[in-house]
Amino acid sequence: MRLKNKVALVTGGASGIGREAAILFAQEGAKVVIVDVNTREGNRIVKAIKAKNQVAGFCRVDVSVEQDCKRMMAYAKRKFGGLHILFNNAGIMHGGDGDTQSTDEAVWDLTMNINVKGVFFGCKYGIPLMRASGGGSIINTASFVAHLGAATPQIAYTASKGAVLAMSRELAVIHARENIRVNALSPGPLRTELLMKFLNTEEKKHRRLVHIPMGRFGEAKEMAKAALFLASDESSYMTGTEFLVDGGITAAYITPE
Ligand code: NAD
């Protein structure tokens, strides 16, 4: 088991990447705190994990709310005694996110509050607990859009993921001597609810697919495996960097027909 005796907290753990990571981390021996705004799904996943005699708990949290983030760390400490793995993964892609002309300030603010401030709060309240637990690994979900621009824009989302990537590097440098590693996980386009809601017609899906050399969307399970590597001691000399898991999209100039 790759995460034996570890405590892991996964934000956005009720769906997509977070759900698959929570399930995989528990299977690998971690005690997992699932954090999400979706109480029903969060509790359902906890129940499924416990049914396999593995360990998990749910804490309802909006990661953009400071008090909530304080509370999720208090929960991890009270319930499982500490924190070794923090997967800051919760994020949104808003339907009203477009170019500068079409995107409202409220959409910009909401996206930044969840996607960027949520990571900041996770680290603000998670790092002291991780330090007290002897160190660990922080994984922040960024995206391939931190590297590539698109003519069908999501200006707030793209800016938020660039911020997550930059913040991850700086966090890594600050905390390197404390046995706390920080890396970004940058997925390519995935077949999860978040993107499929946005690419809601076959034409829109096709427009994205033509840019992916592998010719398919990625799966949340594939991201969970990458997160497991970053979470485990197998990546012990890795900090301040990025794990791009993107079907080759950022390597492509022209893709095969
Ligand atoms: P998803 O929509 O399936 O899951 C996201 C989860 O986050 C949901 O359970 C949702 O309830 C939760 N959430 C949303 N706002 C929250 C908040 N304020 N507080 C707590 N929880 C909240 O999405 P996913 O595809 O699994 O995305 C996970 C992460 O991966 C996000 O950060 C996303 O930006 C990133 N990402 C996704 C893709 C993709 O193509 N799907 C690509 C690159 C990066």
Image (cartoon, helix red, strand yellow):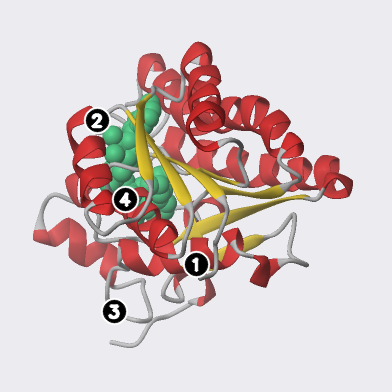
Residue 152 visible in the picture? no
Q: To which residue does mark 2 refer?
A: 38
Q: To which residue does mark 4 refer?
A: 19
Q: CA distance from mark 1 to mark 4?
A: 14 Å
Q: CA distance from mark 4 to mark 2?
A: 12 Å
Question: Residue 77 or 168: which is nearer the viewer?
Answer: 77
Amino acid residing under circle 4: Arg
Q: Quadrant of residue 103?
A: top left
Q: Residue at x 41, y 75 (%)?
A: 247
Question: Which circle, 2 or 3, is nearer the viewer?
Answer: 2
- Label 2: how many residues lie within 10 Å, few (<14), some (14-19) or many (20+)? some
Q: Residue at x 50, y 61 (%)?
A: 227
Disc 2 C-beta below 8 A from ligand 1? yes
**Considering only order in the chain, which callout, 2 or 1, is on the residue closer to the N terminus?**
2
Amino acid residing under circle 3: Gly
Q: Quadrant of residue 28?
A: bottom left
Circles 3 and 1 in contact, beta carbons < 8 Å = no
Residue 198 position within the rendered picture, expressed as x and y whole percent measured from the top left? 22, 45
